[in-house]
Amino acid sequence: MGHSHIHDGHGHSHLPGGAGDGAILVAVVVNLALTGAQILGGYIADSTALIADGVHNLSDALALVLAFGARRLARRPATPEMSYGWGRAEIVAAFVNYVALIAISVWLAIEALGRLASPPQVGAGLVMALAGFALIVDIATAALVWRASRESVNIRAAFLHNLADAAVSLAVILGGLLIWAFGWQIADPLLTLLISAVILWHVGQEIGPVMRMLMLAAPPGIDHQALIRTVTGVEGVASAHHLHLWQIDERRNALSAHLVMRDGADQGLAVQRVKALLRQDFGIDHATIETEREGAPCSDSRHHHGHDDHGSHDHHH
């Protein structure tokens, strides 16, 4: 029985060392300070819309924190205790962040609905001043992380969040103008509901890929049947089973499989060809492949869920 295992950049995310870290750190500090000012100002002005904008801005700050932390952790080498490195810390933190945002958004919506019947008097001047300041910070933050966003999909998402946040700040300024000019106090809870919906929409767009990685799902965009045809099309390979495909993190895909080899086949050469095709056609750089002789029983069959009374596995291809 043959066994082959490759490590290509194992434990690293291939991020440029230190590129843009200073700008990201400055952006995080500024956004956290802005969040505190908006939430405090929202309580003083009795504006749920301003508090909602602050919470939305907090999501941007946390996204930047995750991006910054991931860049730092990704440079740490893998260890026997953390054999995949620290790449998945970003995924866990992102999931916790999104769940917290869902809870906060629901709370904001409930608060806004309670204010629709009897809107309180909102300090329009303070609301517009803080929202205007937030708009400047959002644009400045986007400018700070723009360069780094070209290198990292994670930071690019945070960059797009900042642009969306700028639009939300414009909406809050508009609400303050309506209250100041026409006394339309109902504009504040209505805007709060709108901002809550925007936050939930953002979370809905981004929590799916995070859940897929946490559940060890196959990377999106990979045709499973095409992959099977490619593997079993290599000379000397009769079939494949125990095939598992998952994402280590957002940049690294992994595969493990058993190959059933025909009599007389060069097992080492077949494994090399399979790995080369996996890397070339499917972007899978981390492959663990075990070989077996055709007709011989699989040694792992009885140690997996999904086997029947005869030891066959339901991942047979």
Image (cartoon, helix red, strand yellow):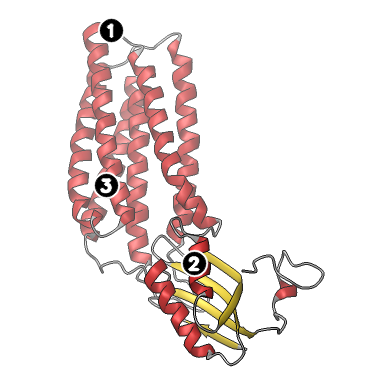
Q: Dot 1: within a 10 Å radius of its alpha carbon, few (fewer than 14), some, or many (20 or more) residues?
A: some
Earlier along the polypeptide chain: callout 2 or callout 3? 3
Q: Nearer the viewer, mark 1 or mark 2?
A: 2
Q: Dot 2: within a 10 Å radius of its alpha carbon, few (fewer than 14), some, or many (20 or more) residues?
A: some
Judge whether 137 appears above or below 317 on screen.
Answer: above
Q: Nearer the viewer, mark 2 or mark 3?
A: 2
Q: Nearer the viewer, mark 3 or mark 1?
A: 3
The kind of residue on which mark 3 rests is Phe
Earlier along the polypeptide chain: callout 1 or callout 2? 1
Give the image location of residue 230, x and y in percent.
48, 71
Q: Quadrant of the N terminus?
A: bottom right
Query: Would you identify the image quadrant in which residue 183 lies?
Result: top left
Helix, strand or loop at disc 1? loop
Q: What residue would you read off at disc 3?
A: 159
Give the image location of residue 222, x and y in percent.
45, 60
Q: Residue at x 70, y 69 (%)?
A: 313
Q: Quadrant of the C terminus?
A: bottom right
The kind of residue on which mark 2 rests is Leu
Would residue 266 be visible to someone looking at this image? yes
Query: Would you identify the image quadrant in which residue 76 lies?
Result: bottom left
Q: What residue would you read off at disc 1?
A: 183
Instruction: Please tell me which residue lies in front, 262 or 19.
Output: 262
Judge whether 181 appears above or below 314 on screen.
Answer: above
Q: Residue at x 26, y 54 (%)?
A: 25
Give the image location of residue 209, x and y in percent.
46, 51
The kind of residue on which mark 1 rests is Gly
User: How far apart, in angstroms, are the residues tagged by discs 1 and 2?
Assistant: 63 Å
Q: What residue would you read off at disc 2?
A: 227
Give the image location of residue 224, x and y in percent.
51, 61
